[in-house]
Image: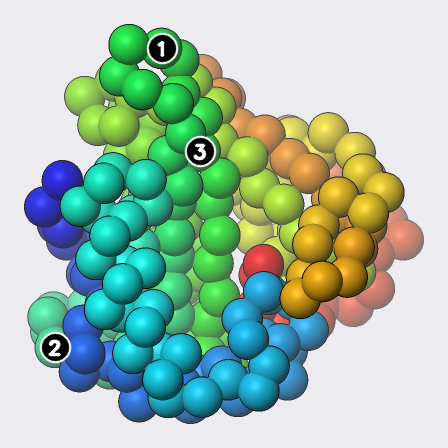
């Protein structure tokens, strides 16, 4: 599939390019990105080059992973402020599933931009006229409340905590897992946990 743009008045999603390599490398120096994602540590420029040149390009070409850079609206070459990715599992002849992932740069967090960008991707992924997935999952390491809050706002149903479900740089970690179906409303389906800590500004898995 050829990469395409998704946009609202607040965010613009377009494919990451080599022009974004330095911004990606800089963003992945953030300790929070290392804590909650599977990026290499230490993260070097060559990792960003490989990500753009191989992972992103191959994912779009094969239809296995769709990756967008989140940018300010109205400028195709605007600075990268985050990333949203969606895996695609299965074949057109069967019901397919996906997994949503995202992160934002420190300056872009806490403004609802991650939720808005992710909703654009979900709407396309679950639309029969789009990717037509039967279900999209969200996975975050336990403790990543900012990621969980985004998933909550998007309408993901928390299915539970799976022990040692996530593999992060060779170490197994407990993870929260949620699902979203095409017919589910894109809004919270339960109250925000009363025992959740105060708002934390960290990226999602």
- Mark 2 vs 1, N-terminal side: 2
Compared with residue 116, is residue 177 higher up or lower down, i.e. above or below? above
Q: Position of residue 83 (x, y in %)?
A: 38, 64
Is 99 on the left-hand or right-hand side of 61?
Answer: right
Q: Dot 3, crowdedness within 10 Å: few (<14), some or many (≥20)?
A: many
The residue singled out by tag 1 in the image is 94
Q: Quadrant of residue 167?
A: bottom right
| Outermost residue, top side | 93
Q: Which residue is mark 2?
A: 77
Q: Is residue 164 left or right of residue 59?
A: right
Q: Position of residue 57 (x, y in %)?
A: 21, 57
User: What is the number of the mark on residue 98?
Assistant: 3
Q: Is residue 130 above or below residue 141?
A: above
Label 2 packing within 10 angstroms: few (<14), some (14-19), many (20+): some
Position of the C terminus by quadrant: bottom right
Q: Out of 106 and 56, give the one closest to the viewer.
A: 56
Closer to the eye: label 2 or 1 = 1
């Amino acid at each position: 599939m050829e990469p395409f743009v998704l946009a609202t008045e607040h965010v613009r999603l377009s494919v990451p390019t080599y022009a974004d390599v330095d911004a990606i490398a800089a963003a992945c120096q953030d300790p929070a990105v290392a804590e909650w994602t599977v990026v290499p540590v230490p993260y070097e420029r060559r990792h960003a080059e490989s990500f753009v040149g191989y992972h992103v390009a191959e994912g779009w070409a094969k239809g296995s992973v769709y990756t967008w850079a989140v940018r300010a609206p109205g400028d195709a070459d605007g600075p990268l402020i985050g990333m949203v990715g969606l895996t695609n599992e299965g074949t057109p002849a069967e019901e397919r599933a996906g997994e949503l992932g995202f992160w934002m740069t420190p300056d872009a967090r806490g403004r609802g931009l991650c939720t808005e960008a992710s909703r654009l991707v979900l709407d396309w992924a679950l639309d029969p006229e789009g990717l037509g997935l039967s279900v999209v999952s969200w996975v975050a390491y336990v403790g990543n409340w900012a990621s969980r809050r985004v998933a909550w706002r998007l309408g993901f149903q928390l299915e539970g905590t799976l022990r040692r479900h996530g593999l992060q740089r060779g170490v197994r970690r407990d993870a929260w897992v949620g699902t979203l179906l095409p017919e589910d409303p894109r809004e919270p389906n339960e109250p925000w946990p009363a025992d959740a800590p105060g708002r934390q500004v960290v990226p999602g898995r």
